[in-house]
Amino acid sequence: MTRRAAEIRLDALLRTACDVIVERGLANTRTADVAAAAGVSQALVFYHFATKERLLAQAFAYAVEQDLARLDAVVRSSAPPLTKLRRMLRLYTPAGRSTSWSMWIDGWAESLRTPELEKASRRLDLRWRQDLTQVISDGVADGTFDCADPAGAAWRINAVMDGLAVQLAVHDRVLTRRQFTEWVRLVAARELGLEPAQLV
């Protein structure tokens, strides 16, 4: 097998693993399930990942990296900080039956028991907060935001978004998408010295 073919096969295995995980959950996904869904031998799955824990951690990271690629595009853009913040808040809102949010929620829960998954979850979660901190810091520097503690504000805004997003993704009709959006804008505006309408 050429290196390129191996990379393509690995990518396909990760995509398949994500599909299986969304359907069965991290705790109930077996390497045999992923092999069967991918149409390959279980030995090939172990060749690429060595352990079930490594497969789950890498599949989780693969799924989350798709979200972070969209986030990175926002952060790297030449847009002003307020525009970046608006886009980041929209990216974070669960849409429909969000596959991404299913993976995040399941990943956080399983991280309590799986050290390798906890490391991946923490690394990826912190990247989001670091990017939000950078956007807030840039907005403070150019006078758009009034915030004495950009890192603390990023953590607080993120904590509210996480909590509301879990409710929106898991519990049907407990919270509307409109309420989620309005409350996140309200919290972000209070943290950054803005009016909520500026985040529309």
Image (cartoon, rainbow, N blue to C red):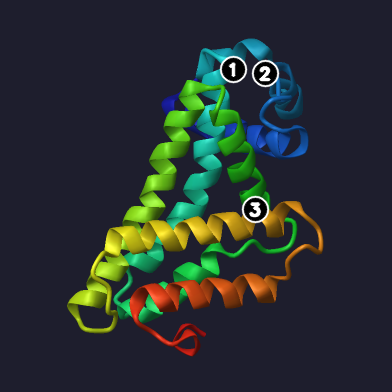
- The answer to whether any part of residue 171 appears in the image is yes
Give the class, few, some or many, for how many residues have Cα within 10 Å of label 3's Cα (few <14, many ≥20): some
169 to 118, vertically: above or below: below
Q: Amino acid at mark 2?
A: Thr
Q: Which mark is residue 52?
A: 1
Label 2 vs 3, first from the N-terminus? 2
Give the class, few, some or many, for how many residues have Cα within 10 Å of label 2's Cα (few <14, many ≥20): many
Give the class, few, some or many, for how many residues have Cα within 10 Å of label 1's Cα (few <14, many ≥20): some
Residue 41 percent location from the top left of the image: 68, 14
Judging by the rendered image, the residue that carries numbered circle 3 is 166
Q: Amino acid at mark 3?
A: Val
Label 3 vs 1, first from the N-terminus? 1
Q: Amino acid at mark 1?
A: Lys
Q: Secondary structure at mark 2?
A: helix
CA–CA distance in space, label 2 to label 3: 27 Å
Viewer-proximal residue among 4 and 150: 150
